[in-house]
């Protein structure tokens, strides 16, 4: 769950694939990791990005106003042109959103992990017959 929540707030077009890779490496539940990335979708895109901006703005004390993320267009003849355009695009995002993204991603991933950890512990206390990694006997 933490892997999916972490990746969900990072503006990548391949969030689900990234969450799956992280879950596989960390031996997590890949289905839950994939599902958690869907928090970020076309309906929630604007509210999430405004929230990321506000968190970054609060932490940095910046007074800049939120501006929608402009489309990245590559125009040029060589890789240097593309790199410069990409860096200019990142720069227009502003430091508020660039600070907000990792702070929110890490915070939500930790909260998700702790919630599942505590919830699972509560289930184990209520139903002691359930054991972690309890494999059926054949």
Image: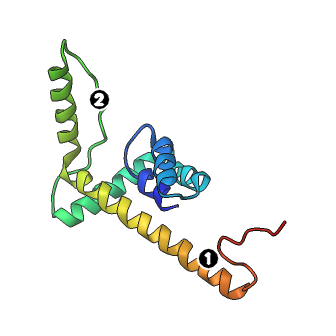
Reply above or below: 100 against 118: above
Reply above or below: 12 against 71: below
Q: Could you say which is closer to the camera, residue 20 or residue 16?
A: 20
Q: Is 130 on the left-hand or right-hand side of 89?
A: right
Circle on res. 120:
1
Residue at position x 49%, y 69% from top? 113
Residue 126 percent coordinates (x, y) = 71, 87
Q: Could you say which is closer to the camera, residue 125 or residue 76?
A: 125
Q: Is 50 on the left-hand or right-hand side of 14?
A: left
Indicate the secondary structure of the residue bearing disc 1.
helix
Q: Could you say which is closer to the camera, residue 48 or residue 107?
A: 107
Residue at position x 21%, y 66% from top? 59
Corner quadrant of residue 130:
bottom right
Corner quadrant of residue 129:
bottom right
Residue 96 percent coordinates (x, y) = 22, 54
Residue 114 percent coordinates (x, y) = 48, 74
Residue at position x 36%, y 63% from top? 106
Q: Where does label 2 land, which residue?
A: 72
Q: Is 128 on the left-hand or right-hand side of 105?
A: right
Residue at far right of view: 138
Corner quadrant of residue 86:
top left
Q: Nearer the viewer, mark 1 or mark 2?
A: 1
Residue at far top of view: 77
What separation in Å lies between label 1 and label 2 (alpha carbons)? 43 Å
Q: Is residue 106 visible?
A: yes
Residue at position x 29%, y 62% from top? 55
Reply above or below: 27 against 10: below
């Amino acid at each position: 769950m933490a892997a999916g929540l972490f990746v969900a707030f990072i503006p990548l077009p391949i969030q689900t694939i990234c969450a799956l890779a992280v879950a596989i490496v960390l031996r997590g539940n890949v289905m839950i990791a994939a599902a958690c990335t869907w928090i970020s979708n076309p309906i929630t895109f604007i509210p999430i990005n405004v929230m990321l901006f506000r968190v970054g703005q609060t932490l940095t004390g910046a007074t800049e106003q939120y501006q929608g993320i402009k489309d990245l267009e590559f125009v040029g003849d060589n890789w240097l042109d593309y790199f410069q355009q990409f860096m200019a695009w990142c720069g227009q995002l502003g430091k508020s959103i660039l600070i907000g993204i990792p702070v929110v991603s890490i915070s939500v991933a930790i909260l998700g992990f702790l919630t599942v950890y505590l919830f699972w512990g509560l289930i184990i206390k209520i139903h002691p017959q359930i054991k972690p990694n309890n494999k059926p006997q054949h």
